[in-house]
Amino acid sequence: MWLGRSCPTLALIVAMAGLAACRTAAPPVRPARVPDPLPPPPSARPLAAAEGEAIYRALAAAEQGDEAAARRAIGRAPAGHPAVALTLLELRFLLGERVGDEAGRLAQAQADYLQAHSFAAQALEAEGRLADALAAARKALPLGGEAGEVRRVRELEALVIGNALDLARAALAGGDGERAVALASDALDVVPGAVSLLEVLVRGYLLEGDVRAAARLVTALPDDGEGLELKGRVAAAGQQWDVAAGLFGRLPAGHPGRCALLQDARRRGRLGQAPPYVQRALGSANLSRAELAALVVWEVPAVTEHARGAASIFEDIVNLAERRDVVAVVRAGVMTGDTVTRRFLPHRRVRSGDLIEVAERLVEVIGRPRLAWCPEGRPDSCLEVPGEVVTGAAASALLRRVALGGEETCH
């Protein structure tokens, strides 16, 4: 009777004890924060189940921050085994130590140990040594690294590139081309062929004035916005203005600075063919009336199409290099001379009011919108009043804007 009543209770107690025993004996899970040291490298002996369990228990304790338990567990593993050597480094890493150099040496000594290379990459990256980490991660790939290893390599390459780009671009912004070149070159040694680094390197060489070095690299760039701009800049640095204009003209419409680059290349190409007196006028520190006439015709060639007025004969321009331009602007009604005395006064210096008057006549002749002058500053909606002493550069810039209707365009 007692036995019959006791059997179900006894069975339940035995079952619960067995379940508890199963739970106690259940092996720990694989490590989550470091590479699994198992299996060991092919050159080492296989580990027994109990030895592998000791490694897993040690790593599980370290991942929870329990250093004492981790040391007790790893003490049951065979000392001197490569998997144990790696586990000891991983334990120290999980507990906050810097072990990058030691991990690198272990991976070098155990060249066929996939997990050792993976851990070296992780430890070195944690110390900010990205190039060394990338080298370790790459060594893991031919040892059978799976998608995770490939992803780590790609991520480290992106970090190396991004870090170098940030520093090199800051150097460029500060005018330090030499430092930008050094940073980009070092990163390219680690990640050869990275287009973004090549672009920075070309910019650095251009900033240093080393056009030949820039030209050697620029052909490797794609014909996208950045690549076309840099190819154009290299051509411009070599004074190949037609080539530069062609490259800038192929830039996407919304590319930053496209219009300015294209206009400058075209203008410099024209300047190379301009008569010497036009070049002198552009460099004049105090423009003369004859030089202003030359700049009007050079900057706004369309004015010659309106030179239909009566031919003026000025005795004081006969021997001037600018005489044809003087006649053209007078016949177009942009500038005037004294028809009674037959004098143009070509050597008289141009003042602010003179230039404003010429500009306002010019817009009427070529059919551009009426000009709006700003008393100060240079907002987009108006033109700055020129200084009292007019330089060739200032007059040239104003005449260009007049020709374009007060706006910068690429046409």
Image: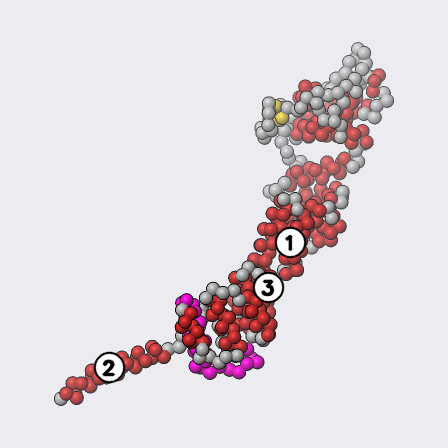
Quarter of image, res 323: top right
| Region in magenta | 39-65
Tell me, yes or no, whether the highlighted magenta stretch contains residue 44: yes
Q: Earlier in the sequence, mark 1 or mark 2?
A: 2
Quadrant of the frame with the C terminus: top right
- Label 3 belongs to which residue? 132
Is residue 149 visible in the rendered image? The answer is no
* Mark 1 neighbour density, 10 Å: few (under 14) some (14–19) many (20 or more): many
- Label 1 belongs to which residue? 183
Q: 219 or 330: nearer the eye?
A: 219
Which kind of residue does numbered mark 2 sit on? Ile
Q: Compared with residue 284, is residue 80 higher up or lower down, i.e. above or below? A: below
Which kind of residue does numbered mark 3 sit on? Asp
Q: Secondary structure at mark 3?
A: helix
Q: Which tag is nearer the camera, tag 1 or tag 2?
A: 1
Q: Is residue 345 left or right of residue 155?
A: right
* Mark 3 neighbour density, 10 Å: few (under 14) some (14–19) many (20 or more): some
CB under 8 Å between callouts 1 and 2? no
Which kind of residue does numbered mark 1 sit on? Leu
Which residue is most to the right? 319
Tell me, yes or no, whether the highlighted magenta stretch contains residue 208: no
Marks 1 and 3 sit apart, C-alpha to C-alpha, by: 16 Å
Q: Residue at x 53, y 72 (%)?
A: 115
* Residue 127 image position (x, y, % from top left): 54, 61
Quarter of image, res 232: top right
| Disc marking residue 13 | 2
